[in-house]
Amino acid sequence: MLSDRHPDRPRPGDIAQLRAGNSIHAKPGDAFVIVEDVPPRIGHVVLNLPVGHPNRDDWAASVHEREIASLTRISPEGIRTWSSTPDPEARA
C-alpha cells in the first residue's frame, strides 16, 4: 500500500470511476474498487467490481492511473471524493 505521504494517489479500497474512452471500455458512471496498486513509476492499479455485483468473483482489470476520472475514499475521518489527475482532453 502507498504511504500517507501521497494521500491523493489511488490505493486499495478506493472507489474509482474511469474517464470516457478508457482501455476496459467502462462507462463513465461505472464504479470499481481498487484492490491492488503497483509502484508509482509503473502507474497501474488493479480493479475489481464492487461488492454485490454478480460478476465480481470472475472479473478484474488493470488500468493506468491516468484513466481514473475520480476517486472516493471512505475512512474514519469521513468520505472524500476528488479528481485523481487533470483530464488532458478537458477544456479550461
Image (spheres, helix red, strand yellow):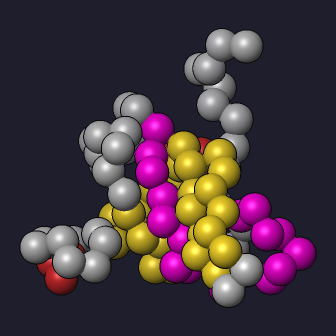
Q: Is residue 48 above or below residue 75?
A: above
Foreground pick, 73 / 87: 73
Query: Which image quarter: residue 1?
Result: bottom right
Is most of the magenta stretch helix, strand or loop?
loop
Q: Is residue 42 visible?
A: no
- Res 22 → quadrant: top left
Q: Residue at x 66, y 13 (%)?
A: 91
Residue 26 appears anywhere in the view: yes
Q: State the residue in front, 61 or 34.
A: 34
* Residue at 45% in and 46% down: 18
Q: Residue 49 is drawn in which quadrant?
A: bottom left
Task: Decide whether residue 8 is among the magenta residues.
Answer: yes
Highlighted magenta segment, given as a residue range: 1-19
Could you say which is closer to the camera, residue 16 or residue 63? Answer: 16
**Please, is residue 30 above or below residue 34 in the view?**
above
Horizontal arrangement in the rendering, residue 92 relative to residue 48 (left or right):
right
